[in-house]
Image (cartoon, grey):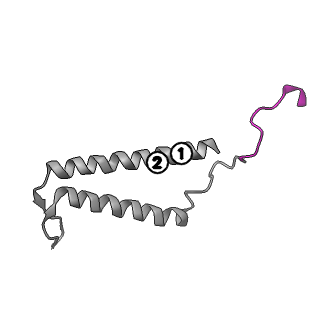
Amino acid sequence: MILKILANFLILLIIAVWVVAIALISVQNATPVSLKFLVFQSIQIPFGLMLAFSMAIGLLTTAVLQPLWGLGESQSGIDEDAEFFVDDEDF
Protein backbone atom coordinates (compact mmCIF):
# COMPACT_ATOMS: atom_id res chain seq x y z
CA MET A 1 0.00 0.00 0.00
CA ILE A 2 2.73 2.43 0.96
CA LEU A 3 4.73 1.52 -2.14
CA LYS A 4 1.79 2.41 -4.38
CA ILE A 5 1.42 5.77 -2.64
CA LEU A 6 5.17 6.39 -2.98
CA ALA A 7 5.11 5.42 -6.66
CA ASN A 8 2.19 7.76 -7.36
CA PHE A 9 3.98 10.54 -5.47
CA LEU A 10 7.16 10.04 -7.49
CA ILE A 11 5.21 10.08 -10.76
CA LEU A 12 3.49 13.32 -9.78
CA LEU A 13 6.81 14.81 -8.69
CA ILE A 14 8.41 13.98 -12.05
CA ILE A 15 5.48 15.51 -13.94
CA ALA A 16 5.61 18.62 -11.74
CA VAL A 17 9.33 19.05 -12.42
CA TRP A 18 8.67 18.73 -16.17
CA VAL A 19 5.90 21.33 -16.01
CA VAL A 20 8.17 23.76 -14.15
CA ALA A 21 10.98 23.13 -16.63
CA ILE A 22 8.63 23.78 -19.56
CA ALA A 23 7.41 26.97 -17.90
CA LEU A 24 10.99 28.22 -17.46
CA ILE A 25 11.96 27.30 -21.01
CA SER A 26 8.80 28.96 -22.33
CA VAL A 27 9.57 32.23 -20.60
CA GLN A 28 13.18 32.27 -21.77
CA ASN A 29 12.53 31.14 -25.38
CA ALA A 30 9.65 33.14 -26.77
CA THR A 31 10.96 33.11 -30.35
CA PRO A 32 8.58 31.46 -32.80
CA VAL A 33 9.61 28.17 -34.43
CA SER A 34 7.99 25.84 -36.92
CA LEU A 35 8.31 22.11 -37.43
CA LYS A 36 9.26 20.68 -40.82
CA PHE A 37 8.60 17.08 -41.85
CA LEU A 38 9.29 16.11 -45.46
CA VAL A 39 7.28 18.72 -47.40
CA PHE A 40 4.97 19.66 -44.51
CA GLN A 41 5.57 22.69 -42.30
CA SER A 42 3.64 23.84 -39.25
CA ILE A 43 2.70 27.39 -38.40
CA GLN A 44 5.15 29.37 -36.29
CA ILE A 45 4.43 29.18 -32.56
CA PRO A 46 6.64 29.90 -29.52
CA PHE A 47 9.14 27.15 -28.65
CA GLY A 48 7.77 26.71 -25.12
CA LEU A 49 4.24 26.22 -26.41
CA MET A 50 5.45 23.62 -28.89
CA LEU A 51 7.34 21.88 -26.09
CA ALA A 52 4.21 21.88 -23.90
CA PHE A 53 2.10 20.44 -26.75
CA SER A 54 4.69 17.74 -27.37
CA MET A 55 4.75 16.76 -23.70
CA ALA A 56 0.95 16.69 -23.50
CA ILE A 57 0.71 14.51 -26.60
CA GLY A 58 3.35 12.15 -25.20
CA LEU A 59 1.58 11.85 -21.84
CA LEU A 60 -1.80 11.23 -23.45
CA THR A 61 -0.39 8.69 -25.89
CA THR A 62 1.32 6.81 -23.06
CA ALA A 63 -1.84 6.88 -20.94
CA VAL A 64 -3.91 5.46 -23.80
CA LEU A 65 -1.41 2.83 -24.98
CA GLN A 66 -0.29 1.57 -21.55
CA PRO A 67 -3.42 -0.56 -20.93
CA LEU A 68 -3.26 -1.90 -24.49
CA TRP A 69 0.33 -3.07 -24.07
CA GLY A 70 -0.29 -4.49 -20.61
CA LEU A 71 2.48 -2.38 -19.06
CA GLY A 72 0.41 -1.84 -15.94
CA GLU A 73 0.36 -5.56 -15.13
CA SER A 74 3.01 -7.23 -13.05
CA GLN A 75 5.42 -8.93 -15.44
CA SER A 76 7.51 -10.65 -12.78
CA GLY A 77 4.82 -13.11 -11.68
CA ILE A 78 5.37 -12.37 -7.99
CA ASP A 79 2.22 -12.49 -5.92
CA GLU A 80 1.82 -9.34 -3.81
CA ASP A 81 0.42 -11.33 -0.89
CA ALA A 82 3.25 -13.88 -0.89
CA GLU A 83 5.49 -14.14 2.13
CA PHE A 84 8.94 -12.77 1.49
CA PHE A 85 10.59 -14.25 4.55
CA VAL A 86 10.61 -18.02 4.93
CA ASP A 87 11.88 -19.89 7.97
CA ASP A 88 14.68 -22.36 7.36
CA GLU A 89 12.88 -24.89 9.57
CA ASP A 90 10.21 -25.47 6.92
CA PHE A 91 12.70 -27.19 4.60
The residue at the point 18 percent across, 70 percent down is: 38
> Residue 21 location in percent, x, y?
28, 46
The residue at the point 17 percent across, 64 percent down is: 35
Q: Amino acid type of disc 1? A: Ala
Tell me whether the residue at label 2 lies in contact with that at label 1, contact meaning CB atoms closer than 8 angstroms. Answer: yes
The residue at the point 40 percent across, 60 percent down is: 59
Q: How far, Cα to Cα, is label 2 from label 1?
A: 6 Å
Q: Is residue 46 left or right of residue 51?
A: left
> Residue 43 location in percent, x, y?
14, 70
Question: Which structural element holds mark 2?
Answer: helix
What is the crowding at mark 1: few (fewer than 14 residues within 10 Å), some, or many (at least 20)? Answer: few
Q: Residue furthest right?
A: 90
> Residue 65 location in percent, x, y?
48, 65
Q: Amino acid type of disc 2? A: Ile
Q: Which residue is mark 1?
A: 7
Residue 83 lies in the magenta-colored region: yes
What is the crowding at mark 2: few (fewer than 14 residues within 10 Å), some, or many (at least 20)? Answer: few
Quarter of the picture holding the N terminus: top right
| Residue 49's disc number | none
Question: Which structural element holds mark 1?
Answer: helix
Residue 44 lies in the magenta-colored region: no
Q: Camera-side residue: 75 or 55?
A: 55
Count of all numbered marks drawn on residues in the image? 2
Report the magenta residues as a range. Answer: 80-91
Predominant secondary structure in magenta? loop
Q: Residue furthest bottom?
A: 40
Residue 8 visible, this angle: yes
Q: Which residue is mark 2?
A: 11
> Residue 24 location in percent, x, y?
22, 47
